Image: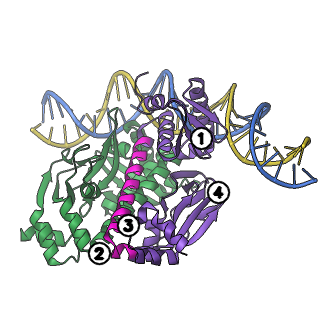
Chain colours: A purple, B green, C blue, D yellow
Amino acid sequence: MSEIRDTLGKIDLFAGLPVSLLDRLAGAAHRVSVRKGEFVLRQGEEAHLFFVVLAGRLRLVQHTADGKDVTMSVFVPGDAIGLIVAIMDELYPGSAEALEDSDTLALPGDLMWQAMNDNAPLAVRVLKMVAGRLKEAHSRIRELSAERTEQRVARSLLRLVQKVGAPESDDAVRLDMRLGRQDLAQMNGTTLETVSRILAVWERDGIVRAGREQITILNPHALVVIAEDLPH
Amino acid sequence: MSEIRDTLGKIDLFAGLPVSLLDRLAGAAHRVSVRKGEFVLRQGEEAHLFFVVLAGRLRLVQHTADGKDVTMSVFVPGDAIGLIVAIMDELYPGSAEALEDSDTLALPGDLMWQAMNDNAPLAVRVLKMVAGRLKEAHSRIRELSAERTEQRVARSLLRLVQKVGAPESDDAVRLDMRLGRQDLAQMNGTTLETVSRILAVWERDGIVRAGREQITILNPHALVVIAEDLPH
DNA sequence: CGGCACGTTGAAGGGCTTCAAGCTCTGTGG
DNA sequence: CCACAGAGCTTGAAGCCCTTCAACGTGCCG
C-alpha cells in the first residue's frame, strides 16, 4: 500500500499533496495492467473510476456508428484518463486502449472529487489539465477543417515527438512507441493507404525512416515546413 | 452598479452565489456592446478579461495561417467566452466575433480565480462548463474525421436547433440568428458553394426552407437520418 | 435605385478513398 | 527451431466527393 502511496506522490497531478490525502487516495487505488490491444475502460460504460498511466502508452478512441475508430489522444505515463467523466458520473464517451503492454492506477472519481474540494491546488491542476486538452482539441478541429492530409500527418508526428521522442544522433528522433500506419490514419481522419503513400514519399526524400510500427524522424525541420505549408 | 449585480445573479454560472461575492464581481464588471462583425477579443492578445454574453450571438473563430477562418463554437446569452484563458493569463487562442449586435459583460480573470477558490460550487460549474466544451470538441473531431460534409452540415443545424431554435407550426423550427452559407461552411470545414448546393437539395426535398442568412428546419427527423447516415 | 454582400450554378480538376492483389515481416505452435 | 498463418504494409487503378474558379442572379440597405 505505501508502495502505491509513493507511486502516487511521484505523479505530477498529485505532487505536493498532504500525506494524509495521499494516503486516502492510495488506500482506494488499485493497479490495473493491460496488454496491447486491451481496454482499461470502454465507451458507454458508467464512469466511476479514472486511470493514471504508470507505464506504457494508451490511446483514447471513439467508435463511430459505422465501425470506424477515431483516436482522440495518446496517453503516456503521468497522464490521467477519464478523470472528468468519472467525477461527473457520466458515461465514458470513448474507450481507452493499450497501444502496448501498460500499467495504470485505477482511482474512484468520487474520492477525487472530495480531494479537489479539500485541496485547491489539486483542483487547479485538474482544471489546467482539462484546459490544455480543450486547447489541443480546438487545434485539431482547426487542422481537420482547413489543412490537407499530408500537413495533418506531419503535425501528428511532430506532436508525438514532444510526447515520446527519443533523440538519436544529429537531429534524428525516434518515436518510442508502436505506431502503425493504421494508428496514424485514425489520428488524422484518413486511411492507412494514404498514410503509407505519404510516408513512402517522405522516406524517399530522407525526411523519415519508416519501419514496421516504428518511425524515426530524420529531418524535423522539413516536417515543420510541410505542416505549415511553407513554400518549398 | 446594483443593476449589474442583478444581471449577474440571473446568469446560470453565477446562480446561488453569496451576495458579497456577487457584489465584488459586479464592481469589477463593465458592459461591452458590439455590433455585427466586431470582436470582443482577438486571437493573440493577452487574456486578462473574459466575457459573459447578455444578448445576441457571438462565435469563437480561429484564423489559420493561410487566411481561412474556422468557427469553434457559437455563444448565446448565458455563455462565458475566454474564461479559462483569462484565468490562466495566457494568450487568446481565437477571436470572439459578434454574429449580430450583442451585449456582453467583461470580467477580470484574476478576480474570477479568487472567487473560484472561495466558492467550491462556482469552481464546479466552471469545470462542468469546460468539460462540456471538451466533450463537444471531441464530437466534432470524430465528425470531421469520419463523416461526409452533408452529414456534418446536418449535425450543425441540429446543434443550432438546440441552441437558438424557435419552434413554429408542426415540427418546423426556425433558427433565431443570422446564419449565412459562409458561416455554415466555416463551422464544418467546407466551402460556401458546397453548403449552397446541399441546402438547395434539402430545400427541393422539403427538409428546410433556406433564405438569405436565415434557415428554417421543416423536417428535423429527415436531418437526423442524414446526420446518422441511416438507410433512406 | 444603385451598389454590394449574399447566394446560385456550372465546369474542371485534384486529393483522397475504396477496392484489390500481392508482398514482407513477425511471432507462435507444432 | 522452423514453418506458416496472419498482421502489417505497399502499390495500382478507378472514381467520387469536394474544392476551386468563374460568371451570373438576387435582394437588401443606404
The residue pinned by badge 4 equals A101
Answer with left or right where residue B199 lies relative to residue A100: left
Comes first in the chain, label 1 or label 3: 3
Residue at mark 2: chain: B
> Mark 1 belongs to which amino acid?
Thr
Comes first in the chain, label 3 or label 4: 3
Magenta residues (range): A115-143
Residue A201's spot in the image, x, y percent? Answer: 58, 26
Label 1 Cα neighbours within 10 Å, binned few <14 / some 14-19 / many ≥20: some
Dot 1 falls on a residue whose secondary structure is: loop
Mark 2–mark 3 Cα distance, whole angstroms, equals 24 Å
Q: Tell me the chief SS of the magenta region.
A: helix
Mark 3–mark 4 Cα distance, whole angstroms, equals 29 Å
Vertical relation: C23 (above or below) A117: above
Tell me, for residue B121, which label it has, or none.
Answer: 2
Could one spot residue B93 in this view of the protein? yes
Label 4 Cα neighbours within 10 Å, binned few <14 / some 14-19 / many ≥20: some
Comes first in the chain, label 1 or label 4: 4
> Mark 3 belongs to which amino acid?
Gly
